[in-house]
Image (tube, grey):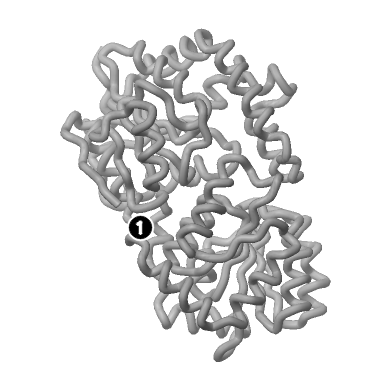
Amino acid sequence: MPAVSAPGGRPEAVLFVVDAGGGHRATANALVAGAEGQASGVRLRVVSLQEVLAPLDPARRLFGHGLEDVYNALVRRRRTRFLVPLLRALQLSIAALHGRLVARIAGFLAEAPPAVVVSLLPNFNAVLRDAVARLSPRPPFVVLMTDLADFGPRFWLEEGLDGVVVPTEEAARQALSLGLPQGRIWRTSGLVLHPRFYPRGSAEVRARVRQELGARGEDGLAMLLFGGNGSPEMLGLAAALLSRTEARVVAVCGHDDALYAAMGPLEERYRGRLRRLGFTDRVAELMAASDVLLTKPGPGSLAEAFHQRVPVVVCGDARTIPQERFNVRFVAERGLGLTVGRWRDAPAAVETLLRDGQLLDALRARLETLAENRALWEALGVIDSLARATPAVSLSA
């Protein structure tokens, strides 16, 4: 059965995502926006694996709730200490249901066979690999990582993949160790960012936004961002920053309406030094105007900060999500910010950065040594090449 072409004769790439966390869907949205912006010859179709597997959802069998609901509830409530054993239990459940999961995905794909299948999600890549292998002709199956590194075994990387798109040398090394050939490991210049994030904040943008936020001259400006869903911890962190520094603070609460409301009295108390925001599409310019970003070590926020050349303060503790633990080490080893072992120490780290101009300048200098992030266009190039059955581009750091 030949692969189905999208309207206009364009080959189609299926992008599998889950909504456990926001990074997988955000990356898919970025790829779609990027493809539309450059009039790509390949049509991208985003598919929720959760919806395809709903009747067989292994998390629902284990926990009584869907995979995405379980994960998001644990993260939202900061009940993440036991994510590793829960993760391994989920992986065992997936293995037990392997045959049935493969059959269901293969049946779904056979209805409209794509030219290439791309996974933007972990844990199910052996299942997806084997489902794609049932199609005839078989399209290539590629994993595009949305984390800085794998948290193996059987998290992102599996044997027998047709290729993997990775954002760091560590992830490339992990892929090599599983036996993936060098020519099928495409190393991008970072994590995929949405096209609206690529323009770097100019001096004019920085000055305008800082003036809007009340930061003048050498006033320090600290940004608080814990992803699109916020985090209750932001309230205490904002209060500590305001009480121990003279800095201005902008806190992006995301979709957390309760957090936004709770920030109200604090904003009133500090009259102009705190600006609270809900979900906003101005993160790029807010970040460009800031002197430091205090954030959880999620790959998306870190990638955005790296691109805007903003030093970060992150915490690595027992509740850090397993796949984000490498990110804390990455920040420390590359000199891209400061790391702490307890969240209550984070405000002091921000204070240190704002008071120590030499340290702040040194971190900014290290950020400037990072490769210019072109990951969106690099990833689209790989997908386009595979969908058109042409030699995939060779990427390097």
Tag count in the figure? 1
Which quadrant is the N terminus positioned in? top left
Whether residue 168 is visible = yes
- The kind of secondary structure element at disc 1 is loop
Give the percent coordinates (x, y) of residue 27: 45, 45
Residue located 25% across and 43% down the image: 381
The three-letter code of the residue at mark 1 reads Asn
**Would you place residue 203 above or below residue 64 in this image?**
below
Give the percent coordinates (x, y) of residue 363: 48, 71
Crowd around label 1: few <14 · some 14–19 · many ≥20 (10 Å) = many
**Would you place residue 75 above or below residue 343 in this image?**
above
Residue, far left: 390
Q: 232 or 39: nearer the eye?
A: 232
Residue located 42% across and 67% down the image: 367
Q: 15 or 246: nearer the eye?
A: 246
Q: Is residue 320 left or right of residue 36?
A: right
Q: 331 or 260: nearer the eye?
A: 331
Q: Is residue 52 left or right of residue 238?
A: left
Whether residue 32 is visible = no
Q: 211 or 84: nearer the eye?
A: 84
Give the percent coordinates (x, y) of residue 267: 76, 74
Where is residue 240, by image quadrant?
A: bottom right
Residue located 42% across and 81% down the image: 203
Where is residue 233, by image quadrant?
A: bottom right
**Would you place residue 317 above or below residue 249 in this image?**
above
Residue located 37% across and 33% down the image: 175
Residue hosting label 1: 373
Give the percent coordinates (x, y) of residue 169: 37, 46
